[in-house]
Image (spheres, helix red, strand yellow):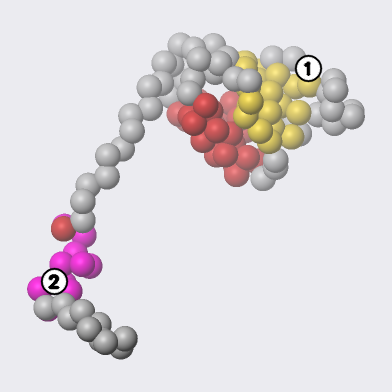
């Protein structure tokens, strides 16, 4: 084959590329949600230069990948920054009600606000 020669596809091969029926099925991971895990959403100002932060505790036994995906979704919903480390999700600002609604929508039943 030369530099400008391209492999040719038959019409059937070409149609099969865009046909979603021929696409391989992706395996979706089942998230193991225990609805009775006590999740507490705290509000803290300590060690943060006087700025408030919403801290989600109670997910210490979850995988770090799952914790990071929760953090990413919450940050997108609230439109703020945050981080997931040491089994906690830290979100900048007071967004406790939004976080509570997020976890209840996931199927967690024992989600409560804690702190002032």
Residue 16 colored in magenta in the image: yes
* Residue lying at 17% horizontally and 81% vertically, measured from the top left: 8
Q: Nearer the viewer, mark 1 or mark 2?
A: 2
| Mark found first going from the N terminus, 1 or 2 | 2
Point out the residue furthest to the front here: 2
Left or right of 82 on screen, residue 116: right
Residue 39 colored in magenta in the image: no
Range of residues picked out in magenta: 11-21
Left or right of 65 on screen, residue 28: left
Number of on-image labels: 2
* Residue lying at 85% horizontally and 20% vertically, measured from the top left: 46
* Residue lying at 75% horizontally and 22% vertically, measured from the top left: 43
Q: Position of residue 57 (x, y in %)?
A: 62, 17
Q: Position of residue 109 (x, y in %)?
A: 48, 17
* Residue lying at 22% horizontally and 83% vertically, measured from the top left: 1
- What is the CA distance from the residue labelled 1 to the residue labelled 2? 63 Å
Q: Is residue 97 visible?
A: no
Q: Quadrant of residue 98?
A: top right
What element does badge 2 sit on? Answer: helix
Who is closer to the viewer here, 20 or 40? Answer: 20
What element does badge 1 sit on? Answer: loop
Q: Which residue is mark 1?
A: 116
Above or below, comparing residue 71 to residue 10 in the picture: above
Q: Quadrant of residue 15?
A: bottom left
Q: Main secondary structure of the magenta part?
A: helix
Classify 10 Å Cα crowding around label 1: few (below 14), some (14-19), many (20 and above). few
Q: Which residue is mark 2?
A: 13
């Amino acid at each position: 084959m030369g530099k400008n020669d391209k492999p040719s596809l038959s019409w059937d091969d070409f149609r099969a590329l865009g046909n979603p029926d021929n696409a391989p099925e992706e395996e979706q991971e089942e998230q193991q949600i225990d609805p009775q895990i006590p999740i507490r959403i705290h509000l803290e100002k300590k060690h943060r230069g006087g700025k408030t932060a919403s801290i989600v505790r109670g997910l210490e036994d979850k995988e770090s990948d799952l914790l990071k995906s929760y953090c990413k979704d919450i940050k997108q919903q609230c439109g703020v920054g945050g981080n997931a480390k040491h089994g906690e999700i830290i979100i900048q600002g007071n967004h406790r009600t939004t976080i509570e609604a997020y976890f209840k929508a996931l199927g967690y039943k024992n989600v409560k606000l804690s702190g002032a």
